[in-house]
Amino acid sequence: MTIKDVAKKAGVSISTASYALNDRPNVHPQTRERVLKAAEELNYFPNAHARNLKSQKSRNIGVFINGFGGPIYSDLLEGINLELQKKNYNIIVSSGKSSSVMLRQRSVDAAIVFDEKIPNEDIIRFSRRQPIVVLDRVLQGENIYSSMIENERLVYEFILTIVKEKGYKNITYVSGPKNSVYGMDRYKGFLKALEELNIKNHNFIQCDFTINSGYEAGFNMIENNQIPDLVYSANDEMAIGVIKAFNEKNIEIPNRVAVAGFDGIYITDYTTPKLTTIAINYFEWGRQLAGFLTRVLNNISVYPLVNPEAKVVIKESV
Amino acid sequence: MTIKDVAKKAGVSISTASYALNDRPNVHPQTRERVLKAAEELNYFPNAHARNLKSQKSRNIGVFINGFGGPIYSDLLEGINLELQKKNYNIIVSSGKSSSVMLRQRSVDAAIVFDEKIPNEDIIRFSRRQPIVVLDRVLQGENIYSSMIENERLVYEFILTIVKEKGYKNITYVSGPKNSVYGMDRYKGFLKALEELNIKNHNFIQCDFTINSGYEAGFNMIENNQIPDLVYSANDEMAIGVIKAFNEKNIEIPNRVAVAGFDGIYITDYTTPKLTTIAINYFEWGRQLAGFLTRVLNNISVYPLVNPEAKVVIKESV
DNA sequence: ATGAAAGCGCTAACAT
DNA sequence: ATGTTAGCGCTTTCAT
């Protein structure tokens, strides 16, 4: 079923059919009726490829993430989706190879990139045609917009405040993988705070952002008899693992050891004790990003793209 | 940059450029070289819309889900993605309005539908052109394939076994929303087991699949002094909420009350006690689905699509 | 081995 | 208000 079939059935030319279907002016009401009826009866829907080819746009927005796991992406995607839906854009979430393919081949009008595996040079190259928002790196360019969690500042301020207030001396940092820019920025903030606090030593444990790695880290501290006053974890999931390990060995939180994390994921309310964390409003961030991008696409001049909201949420674990 | 520019720069015709770029035979090696070099220098990539229009396919597979939240989708999507990547298909995950748009407008060659909001008639209508796998309903049709968790059977067998073994008398069912087919099938299995066990009464608590609703349900049981021998929850997340409530009030699990769930999500290993559940291998299911669909698209005759693997995982909470 | 040209389905400029 | 037609960028048939 193509527009040609519809036109024939309605007894009009292709262009008239097109006008009618696209709700354009200067079509006789009766003609419009006939065309719409024909389309309905033929079960006709326009072919996206043809339309996109002709119009040189697709109303598709790509969201390229480095994996579908994790509660962070969920909220972010929900926020993006909500906003795009309002503005009548299609969301295309993808991960891995297909992300690059879609960028290259112009399957999307714009993209939100949250995948460190997509190289800078690709982003620079493709941003000429498609505006790109990057969430995981600082990158300059005419059509490139960067929005980032202020990892370093947030952790710095948090550690500074909490340590001053509670007087922790002995502190352990549970780290994400070394190749995560995010993770390392958080560590920088941590180090800066310690320096300012004049704390010379700390323990560093290398983990991989999973609950399980945090769980093991917790056990290691216990076994090595190296339980600190405060465990700061580069994300909530590892912190949850740490808490689990301490709970199992009846090490009291926060009396014996305090624990804090980063992100503010849903489950932090359902651990015992509830996890103190630096919470990012991922849902709202997603909305902002999507809203921004649609404005860019429509040449609506805009406030610059801002960084996501964050706030320290003190619960029970410190 | 179009193929025309490449052809011109390489000093060949458009068709020759196309052949060279697509690695077709009967192109002189030197010519091929020149074309590829020109493409490289011009930073050329084919336009997906044009190519898809001409070839009447896109190598895009749509995965249409009803929301990005939840650990279940994560695993399923990872499995699908892995397999599609292997077979050089693009994954397009979408939710809400854009899902229907993409189905209608043939933006995808095939789809996996896991979104009850997409009506049956749409699926039937569009399956003529694009094979569709549905995961959340039973639906017949030439190009429609259905794969479903055997909710009723699994819950039935589990309840039967566990009650016989442990002798629970007093049982409470924590339910998902009434409009969830999944949820209701699980309840059917539950009822069938009770009938067979000749247990006449049980409590039913209406929740909504979230941790929080389970948490509240747990508190209600305590307040109303209606703590049963076994709480069976239609999914793991509500069960986690229930456990949390009991833990806070020092009601011992499983001594005073047993708790079990459904799905086998990641965190069931990190509750105290660890949650006994009926675990679905969502990752593997995703792989199967994607593999199946690519075979259908390539007319490789196949074994029929199977239902996902499930197994009862007895941990500490019963 | 290479090129000319038709056509995928659609939109829109132009003519009537 | 309606129709004719060019052309979006590509693949592929046919001719050379």
Image (cartoon, coloured by chain):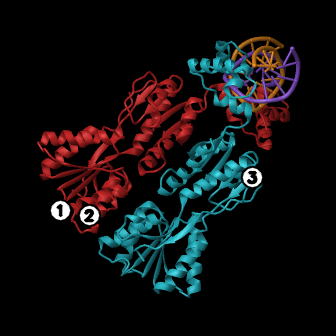
Chain colours: A cyan, B red, C purple, D orange
For label 3, the SS is loop
For the residues marked 1 and 3, what is the alpha-carbon distance in whole angstroms?
62 Å
In percent of the image, x 77 and y 33: which residue is there? B3
In percent of the image, x 36 and y 41: which residue is there? B180
According to the picture, the residue beneath numbered tag 1 turns out to be B256
In percent of the image, x 56 and y 86: which residue is there? A197
Q: Quick one: quadrant of the N terminus of chain B? A: top right
Q: Tell me the amino acid under the disc marked 3.
A: Asn
Do labels 3 and 2 touch, CB within 8 Å? no
Residue B268: x percent and y percent? 33, 57
According to the picture, the residue beneath numbered tag 2 turns out to be B246
Q: Left or right: B158 with respect to A107? A: left
Image vertical order of residue A4 relative to residue A169, above or below = above
Q: Tell me the amino acid under the disc marked 1.
A: Arg
Q: Nearer the viewer, mark 1 or mark 3?
A: 1
According to the picture, the residue beneath numbered tag 3 turns out to be A143
Residue B274 appears in the rendering: no
Q: Left or right: A16 with respect to A152? A: right
| Marks 3 & 2 on one chain | no
Residue A79 appears in the rendering: yes
Q: Tell me the amino acid under the disc marked 2.
A: Phe
